[in-house]
Amino acid sequence: MTDHIGRFAPSPSGPLHSGSLLAAVASYVDAKAHKGQWLLRIEDVDRHRTVKGSRDRILKSLEHHGLHWDGTIELQTNNDDRYEAALEQLHQQQKVFFCQCSRTALKQTPGPYPGTCRTKKTSRYIAATRHQPASHTLRFECGEDTIDFTDRILGKQSFELAQLGDFILRRRDSLFAYQLAVVIDDAEQSVTSVVRGADLLSSTPWQIALQQALNLPAMNYAHLPLITHANNGQKLSKQTGALAINNSHAANNIYIALTQLGQQLPEQAQRLSVEQLLIWAIDHWQINRIPKTALIAS
Ligand code: GLU
């Protein structure tokens, strides 16, 4: 074992589809190629999007596809206390503000959050966040820094935080936001390597800004090409009607995922079992072969 820790972090809002399987396979093979651990976290922080039964379906699909996680499964719904503690720490640093902008008002000013409520940080507001948690959102004040990082697939990235705007840490319905939860959980689970879809590339600078504010260790990132629908170019997702993966075609699904990831497979690959394919992929993993641009669903 090395200290490389990767993870797969699906939201239980539906079954796995070929896009999420790609992230599962890539993060698994990458972790195992580095002789590291591969953790599983169910990102159920947004209780409203949770679809009953989908967590079990996801676990079952992962098992069918030979993707066995290390350790116990982490559930975000158990972690409110740690998110609250992080929020408190950010409050102390005056990095959080109380935002009462309505959705309608924000729609009228397209682009990043205009900074309207940034001054609402005094103790009066902090007290209000505890006593009427649902009347407003809490946002992180990003400042003007530039965030630079080198993506293991996409290369050098540079983002101006001012262009991205202040983001939500806790929502109006008082649920913690994904951006906060993911940063806290990755740190808590000692994750060193994040491999996930390129739809989250623009969230990465926000997450790095949060890590820096909270003094959490940096990690490395690899953003995978998205799979898009052949007819309209939309990202394959539960919302755009992506089909659940078929567990009875697991070996073929793994074969397709590895092909989409640009990995060189042996001639007889289509006759190999799930386990044999994964072992081959781990032994021959080349992250630099992963395409940088979107893939079209077959
Ligand atoms: N929960 C997110 C999703 O299912 C993934 C978050 C991440 O990998 O950081 O899209």
Image: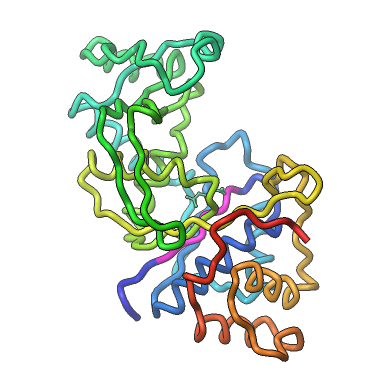
- Queried whether the magenta region covers residue 284, the answer comes back as no
Q: Which coloring applies here?
A: rainbow
Residue 257 higher or lower than 233, as above or below: below
- Residue 95: image quadrant is top left
Q: Nearer the viewer, residue 296 or 1?
A: 296
Residue occupying the point 47% across, 21% down? 111
Residue occupying the point 49% across, 44% down? 77
Q: How many numbered dots are placed on residues in this image?
A: 0
- Residue 249: image quadrant is bottom right
**x and y, in percent, of residue 94 in the image:** 20, 24
Is residue 273 found left or right of 152 in the rendered image? right
Is residue 100 found left or right of 52 in the rendered image? left
The quadrant of the image that shows the C terminus is bottom right
Residue 203 higher or lower than 288, as above or below: above
**x and y, in percent, of residue 160 in the image:** 33, 34
Residue occupying the point 28% across, 45% down? 211
Residue 247 higher or lower than 103, as above or below: below
**x and y, in percent, of residue 244 in the image:** 76, 56
The quadrant of the image that shows the N terminus is bottom left
Residue occupying the point 44% across, 33% down? 176
Q: Nearer the viewer, residue 220 or 247?
A: 220
**x and y, in percent, of residue 194 in the image:** 42, 58
- Residue 218: image quadrant is bottom left
Q: Which segment did they paint magenta?
A: 6-11
Q: Nearer the viewer, residue 116 or 138?
A: 116
Residue 273 higher or lower than 73, as above or below: below
